[in-house]
Image: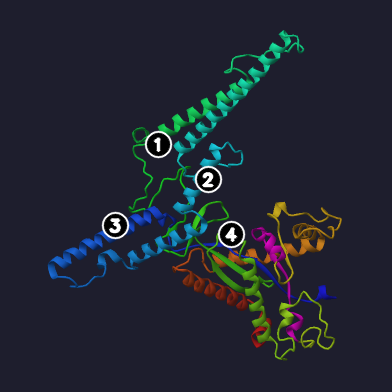
Amino acid sequence: PRTNRPSLQLRRGGPKIAANASKKATCRQQWLQQKVDDILTRVAGEDAAEDAAFGPGEPGDETPQQLRGRRDREERLKQALAEVIAEEAERGLDDEATAAKERAFLEATRAGRNDVGSRPVGADPVAIAEARLQEAKARLAKEVAAKRERIAVMRERIRRFEAGEGPKPNLGPFSFDENRGQQVARAKRWVARAERELTAARAQTDPQSSAREQPALTLVPGGGRHGPRRIKTKDERPGARRNVTDLDSRLMQDRNGGMIQGYNAQLAVSDDGLILSPRVVQDANDRRQLQPMIQAALTAALLIHRARCSRQCPTLGRCCIDASAERDDAAHPWGCAGTDCPCRADWIGALLFDAGYWTQDNLTAPGPDRLIAPGKNGDLPQPGEHPDPPPEDADPATVMVHRLATEEGATLYKRRGATVEPVNGHLKDRTALRRFARRGLHACQAELTFAAMVLNLSKLCRLAPARRAAALTT
């Protein structure tokens, strides 16, 4: 049966590897713009002094060497600033998009809509408090007008009763004062609350009171021997950031909950613990890496198969890629069908992914069979938890959960912890790759590829002599 055939099982995993840069050198647009302006001002001063002493064009218009640094700090700052501006424009975090969101929020607040959501981060608290006060006063005026109408209706009922044209009205606790009543009192409380918020917002934004309360704090990051600094506040607008030491590195959360300045290493590992495809990416999470890693794994498996198979299989390696489909060709059901042909072993089985890849697109993406965990180990469905098969119209997420709850699915997914996690540990401990020594995405990719090759060769050298000779002969 097909389940007894050996296969090239692949597991996906990878650690976060620190970059050769400090996270304190990660700056926002305001700091980058300030530094670029300072450098340009100093360069203009140097050029003016040179022109006055030697004349225009003598001795040159380049930035003085003492301002450039070993890696041309001016160019790196300009590039970082350009990338930050482009990313904020793409994500809708630039000033124009932020101002549009604030205007929409203020208009919805003045209209008294309940679907306005939370206050935009970094918005003017005084403007929002004024909009809420305006809406509260409009609500109070509306309730007072409604009370006047009710008073007029009640007076008309009393007049008709006194004229003998109607029943006696039930006054009860009804008050003929337009400033009293349950709805009016509630509207007055809203007005009082909005006035208090406006007073607090004005006091918070008052420069004199802020200077008295926080004399030593500043919201503008500065330099210093510890690099750029910035005081984080809850009213700080979200924005893109770049590291001025390694422009390609990103802030990422490690498994301990802290933040590191580094890269996300993606590893496609075979069932025997060999790294087939190492990749360095800048995304902090793994959601968009499933399909690229599948293609990289298929390419690596195809190269391995073509190097191992000397019979020139008519399928040309499709036995690696098309393992999920049964062979229709009776003469060559599995490649060349030779008993010693690697076609029987090189087809890709199930790909195993952790919870970081759990998305609807990844569940339905084309490619080989896969298992994706819906959560951490403690959140995984246990065997027998879903004994009934899923309905025919079940969504892919439900089908995946039911499959992981079977004995076969649970046993297969356990292999990920026995293959990928040891490789991650070996990569950091045996090859000492906890921090890249080089800077830049391409340089770090080369370093990770070299470390993966060293790790694979070390495993080959630890094989028994007979198995090592057989592997090298193949």
Secondary structure of the residue carrying numbered label 3 = helix
Look at label 2 and name its amino acid.
Ala
Of the residues under marks 3 and 2, which one precedes in the sequence? 3
Q: Is residue 219 left or right of residue 391?
A: left
Look at label 4 and name its amino acid.
Asn
- Measure the C-alpha gap from mark 4 to mark 3: 36 Å
Q: Is residue 27 left or right of residue 449?
A: left
CB atoms of marks 4 and 3 within 8 Å? no
Of the residues under marks 1 and 3, which one precedes in the sequence? 3
Of the residues under marks 4 and 2, which one precedes in the sequence? 2
Q: Nearer the viewer, mark 3 or mark 2?
A: 2
- Measure the C-alpha gap from mark 1 to mark 3: 28 Å
| Label 4, residues with CA under 10 Å away: few <14, some 14-19, many ≥20 | some
CB atoms of marks 1 and 3 within 8 Å? no
Secondary structure of the residue carrying numbered label 4 = loop
The answer to whether residue 218 is magenta is: no
Look at label 3 and name its amino acid.
Asp
Quadrant of res 421: bottom right
- Measure the C-alpha gap from mark 1 to mark 2: 22 Å
